[in-house]
Every structure is written in C-alpha cells, then in structure tokens.
C-alpha cells in the first residue's frame, strides 16, 4: 500500500492530506482558494492519485501561507507514500499542451529536493489565487518530496492556462515516475545503491 496521511498545524495554517499513489484520480479538495482547489483536483485526476486535502489558513492575510504549506505537506505525503523507492521507474517527463500553453515537466525521485523553474507566469489574480504562488507551491512540494523537478514553459499567454498546464504536466510526469517497473522487481533504481 503506497499511501500516506500527513497533518501539519502552525499558527498560520492547519493542513491534513491523505494520498494514495495507486488510486484512480479521486479528489476531495478544500483549501478555501477556489482556483487552487481546481489545480489540486486536476493534479489528482491527471496523476491518478487519490488525494484528499483539507486546509484552513490565514486567508484574511492572503493565500501565501496556505498554498506554501499545502505544498510542504503534499511533498511530505509523496515522500512517505513512495517509501524506499524500490521497483519504481524513478523518472518521468512529459510535454503537455493546453490550448496555447505548452509546459515541459521532468521529475526524478532522486532523494535530493530541488525545483528548476523556467516559467514566465505574469503576475495576475486568478480568482483569489495570486499567480506568483504557483512557484512557491512547487518549491515547497519538490523540497519536501525530495524530488528533482524541472518545469519549462514553452508557450502560453493565458495565465489560467499556463498554471493549469503546469499542474497537469507535473502530475503526469509524477505518475510515470512512481509507476512500478515490471522488469525491475524490487531493485533500487540507482547505481549508487541508495536514493
């Protein structure tokens, strides 16, 4: 069972996330930020991850703490659910189109968290979501999942499309990377013998 349930409470947010890497893409999302809920729903559906997110944050300030802390906890949930990484493909990548937007995402369950960001997302409020928070989410997620994540925007004008394309592309790359490799049995996908 590649599942996890993580909670995190601070003076700014209260986050609870459950994740099943081998799900069918069901999502129950409530962060108080409509567009962010939409992105996490798309993330679950395109990754085929069963995902439940309940987040209460200081939205009277802004969405920053909520979005970043969801990224932290979701990253921790991935790290716990993937376990020792034996038998997984480890790498995944995709170039995903959404209308005029085109985003490349590539992931490695390297054990070394890092985001490599080549996105050009203009500042804009998409509903109550500040577009600059997309990067904050992915920094927190990649760091806490201990993955190397490259994202590159190849085209795009509409901010909604660009961000949605980014979430979907990352989910699809992750879906490929966490798949069990039938030829690898329980082997660790590393020449070093450790990840």
Image (cartoon, rainbow, N blue to C red):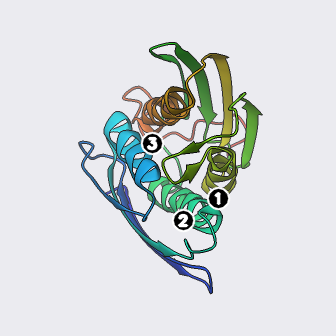
Query: If you read the primary sequence from the N terminus, does the residue marked by circle 2 or circle 3 appear first?
Result: 2
Residue at x 56%, y 41% (from the top left corner):
188
Give the SS element for disc 2.
helix
Which element carries disc 3, helix, strand or loop?
loop
The reply, left or right, for residue 176 in relation to residue 49 is right
Please tell me whether residue 184 is drawn above or below residue 193 in the rendered image. above
Residue 122 placement: quadrant: top right
Q: Nearer the viewer, mark 3 or mark 1?
A: 1
Which circle, 2 or 3, is nearer the viewer?
Answer: 2
Most foreground residue, 183 or 6: 6
Helix, strand or loop under label 1:
helix
Q: Is residue 193 above or below residue 128?
A: above
Say which mark, if any, is on residue 164.
Answer: none
Q: Is residue 195 visible?
A: no
- Please name the residue that numbered disc 2 is placed on: 73
Dot 1 crowding, Cα within 10 Å, few <14, some 14–19, many 20+: many
Query: Label 2, label 1: how many angstroms apart (C-alpha)?
Result: 8 Å
How far, Cα to Cα, is label 3 from label 1?
24 Å
- In percent of width and height, residue 159 lies at 57, 30
Depth check, front residue: 36 or 116:
36
Q: Earlier in the sequence, mark 3 or mark 1?
A: 1
Q: Dot 3 surroundings within 10 Å: few (below 14), some, or many (20 or more)?
A: some
Q: Label 2 neighbourhood size at 10 Å, few (<14), some (14-19), many (20+)?
A: many
- Residue 1 position in % (x across, y down): 31, 57
Q: Are marks 2 and 1 in contact (CB under 8 Å)?
A: yes
Which residue is disc 1 drawn over? 144
């Amino acid at each position: 069972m590649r599942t996890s349930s993580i909670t995190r409470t601070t003076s700014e947010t209260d986050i609870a996330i459950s994740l099943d890497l081998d799900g069918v893409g069901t999502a129950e999302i409530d962060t108080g930020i409509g567009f962010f809920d939409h992105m996490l729903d798309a993330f679950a559906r395109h990754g085929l991850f069963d995902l439940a997110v309940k987040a209460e944050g200081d939205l009277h300030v802004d969405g920053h703490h909520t979005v970043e802390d969801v990224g932290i906890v979701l990253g921790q949930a991935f790290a716990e659910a993937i376990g020792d990484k034996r038998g997984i493909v480890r790498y995944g990548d995709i170039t995903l189109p959404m209308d005029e937007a085109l985003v490349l995402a590539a992931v490695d369950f390297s054990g070394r968290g890092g985001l490599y960001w080549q996105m050009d997302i203009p500042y804009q409020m998409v509903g109550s979501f500040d577009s600059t928070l997309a990067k904050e989410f992915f920094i927190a997620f990649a760091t806490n999942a201990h993955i190397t994540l490259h994202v590159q925007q190849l085209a795009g004008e509409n901010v909604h499309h660009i961000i949605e394309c980014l979430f979907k592309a990352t989910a699809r790359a992750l879906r490929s990377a966490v798949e069990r490799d039938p030829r690898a049995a329980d082997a660790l996908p590393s020449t070093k013998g450790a990840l």
